[in-house]
Image: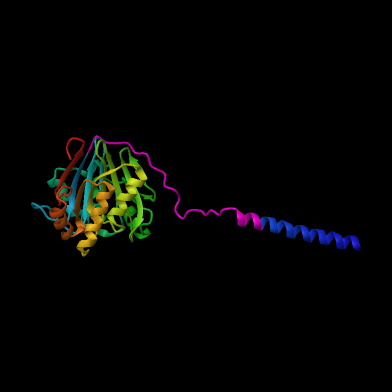
Amino acid sequence: MRYVVILITLIVLGVLITSFIVATYEYLTPRTSTPLVPPTRTVRISSCDYVTIYVLVDNHGYDGFSSPWGISLLIKTRNSSILFDAGPSPEALEVNSRLLGINLSSLKFVVISHEHGDHWYGLRYVAKVAPHIVVYVPAGMSSSVKDDIADLGFKVVNIHNTTVVNGCVAIIGELLGPPWEQALAINVKGLGLIVLVGCSHPGVDRIVAKAVKDLGIKPYAVIGGFHLMGASRDEIKHIVENLIKLGVKRVYPIHCSGDLIRELMKSEYPEIYGDGHVGTTLVFNASKS
């Protein structure tokens, strides 16, 4: 009986000593935690000699073009034709494309920035002239909108992280506005990134910053909707200053950017301001921008 008591005592002592050693080790060892956001891995992207951007739809009217509320931009590189957003109206997209002498049947794919109708309803025209092509959407887009796009005959592909989709063209991974929103970036040799935004619900400066971080390339220009209608002068100046700090050299605020940013930039930042509207054609290359 005595030996049993001794054995149990030794076992208990062993457990207590082991627990003390483990507790001491955990206390003395520096603690680490898993980061909430995984470290960003730079995405490798090639460069284009040039890119031409056509403003197919914008609510800033010009010279007989159809100008409903919305945005659609056509991107042309040496070997690709890409549509970024499709505007709110298939009729407007068709009329304006014809006025600019553009045939959308040669589209390689479409990128939709987010789920609001003024950015994708025009896909009904694309479905007629370029059926069954790929439409890239934010992974966080509502399933009902994805289903509506798929019902038009397109192959819907979800994008979450920044992804190179065509050599010098990358989709900038979604950020939450809300809604979830993605952007497009083209890397032009000798200039840097040309960033296209739909509505910039997450903030145009945040989107450009993500493009720079994910691709490891300086920005040159940003064009699209900045979601600044109703913003104060100070708020707008803060956004513009952030873009300048990021290295942006040209800013084209259209669609939902508001009149105040256009007026402010025209008067206080004329060296980087670019006027834009439906029908505008922009060419970016190292010798002409």
Whether residue 122 is in magenta: the answer is no
Q: Is residue 200 visible?
A: yes
Magenta segment, which residues?
Answer: 23-50
Q: Position of residue 165 (x, y in %)?
A: 34, 42
Residue nearer the viewer, 59 or 32 = 32
Q: How many marks?
A: 0
Q: Position of residue 33 (x, y in %)?
A: 52, 54
User: From what the image shows, is residue 262 above or below residue 53?
Assistant: below
Residue found 22% across the figure and 48% down from its top: 73
The N terminus: image quadrant: bottom right
On the image, which quarter does residue 230 sit in? bottom left
Q: Main secondary structure of the magenta part?
A: loop
Whether residue 44 is in magenta: the answer is yes
Residue found 35% across the figure and 60% down from its top: 144
The image's colour scheme reads rainbow
Q: Residue furthest left?
A: 63
Residue found 28% across the figure and 56% down from its top: 200
Question: Horizontal placement of 156 versus 236: left or right?
Answer: right
Q: Position of residue 26 (x, y in %)?
A: 62, 56
